[in-house]
Image: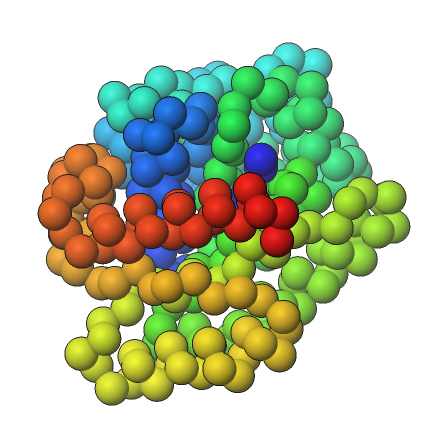
């Protein structure tokens, strides 16, 4: 299952969610690859691989964007996860990818060479770009983290617009529709009235209007950001943090949804 962790806005918790959901699935015996698609390389940093110091040849996107018929490079981590790195070289690689005029390049690479995993989680960049469009064609499913803040909730219509565009492109290319697993409210603080209000907006008005399932929220705790600084998944850094239980519940819900065929 290839899943795009997608929201065109930054700061909504995409990278932390990719890290922690990937690790949670890995601890359950799943074979997991997480792929960074941001030139800042934050996902790699969160998992202790220091992507800024890596040469282009060690990044996931070098092979993809060169058009070579070879598997992309993936790196082992200390956390039972495999990682596709990104760093500053992705800026130039994306330009090269655009020049190929092949919107399904990542899809072809994925189907030819990334088949040994139960899960491939793509941490989408915080903007609509060629890389984003490639991921939305290559993915089987989509998970949308939405921060329970006014700006993020109010801009969810833009997320929906991009999903509609992706579905149209997939139809034109005779690809199966992208499966929207649902929306994950992130950075949620139930003690804040505004957060409860925005969570209610998502669950009672916005997502039902699009027919999207809303998962239980992942709560905001200092340990979530500290885990990134310590270069560890949250479950390893702070196993008793309530947000760790939230991610575990999310993984269970996703697996249940897929097993039941919903």
Residue pictured at 43% horizontal, 62% vertical: 215
Q: Position of residue 21 (x, y in %)?
A: 37, 43
Q: Residue furthest top?
A: 70
In the displayed orientation, state which residue is furthest to the front: 260
Tell me the quarter of the picture where residue 25 sits: top left
Measuring 55% from the left and 18% from the top, which residue is drawn there? 116
Residue drawn 14% across the image and 51% down it:
241
Q: Tell me what residue is drawn at x 62 percent, y 79 percent.
A: 209
Asked which quadrant contains residue 160, the reply is: bottom right
Marker count (numbered): 0
- Left or right relative to 5: residue 250: left
In the displayed structure, does residue 15 sit left or right of residue 35?
left
Residue 115 position in % (x across, y down): 60, 21
Q: Is residue 165 above or below residue 55?
A: below
Location of the N terminus by quadrant is top right
230 displayed left or right of 219: left
For residue 9, say whether it is visible: no
Q: Nearer the viewer, residue 76 or 64?
A: 76
Q: Can residue 90 be seen from the camera position used here?
A: yes
Considering only vertical position in the picture, is 111 above or below 251? Answer: above
The image shows residue 108, relative to residue 187, as above or below, that is above
Residue 181: x and y, percent? 56, 54
Q: Please name the colour scheme applied to the rendered image.
A: rainbow
């Amino acid at each position: 299952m290839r899943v795009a962790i997608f929201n065109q806005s930054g700061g909504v918790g995409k990278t932390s969610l990719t890290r922690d959901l990937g690790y949670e699935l890995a601890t359950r015996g799943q074979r997991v690859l997480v792929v960074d698609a941001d030139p800042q390389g934050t996902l790699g940093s969160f998992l202790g691989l220091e992507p800024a110091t890596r040469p282009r040849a060690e990044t996931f996107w070098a092979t993809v964007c060169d058009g070579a018929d070879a598997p992309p490079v993936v790196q082992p981590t200390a956390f039972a996860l495999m990682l596709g790195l990104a760093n500053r070289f992705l800026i130039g690689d994306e330009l090269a990818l655009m020049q190929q005029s092949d919107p399904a390049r990542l899809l072809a690479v994925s189907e030819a060479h990334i088949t040994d995993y139960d899960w491939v989680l793509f941490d989408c960049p915080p903007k609509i770009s060629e890389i984003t469009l490639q991921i939305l064609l290559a993915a089987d499913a989509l998970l949308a983290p939405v921060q329970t803040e006014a700006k993020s909730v109010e801009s969810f219509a833009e997320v929906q617009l991009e999903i509609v565009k992706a579905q149209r492109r997939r139809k034109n290319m005779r690809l199966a529709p992208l499966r929207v697993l649902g929306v994950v409210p992130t950075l949620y603080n139930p003690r804040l009235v505004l957060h409860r209000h925005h969570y209610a907006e998502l669950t009672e008005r916005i997502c039902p209007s699009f027919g999207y399932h809303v998962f239980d929220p992942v709560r905001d705790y200092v340990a979530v950001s500290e885990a990134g600084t310590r270069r560890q998944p949250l479950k390893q850094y702070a196993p008793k943090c309530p947000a760790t239980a939230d991610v575990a519940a999310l993984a269970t819900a996703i697996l249940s949804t897929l097993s039941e065929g919903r």
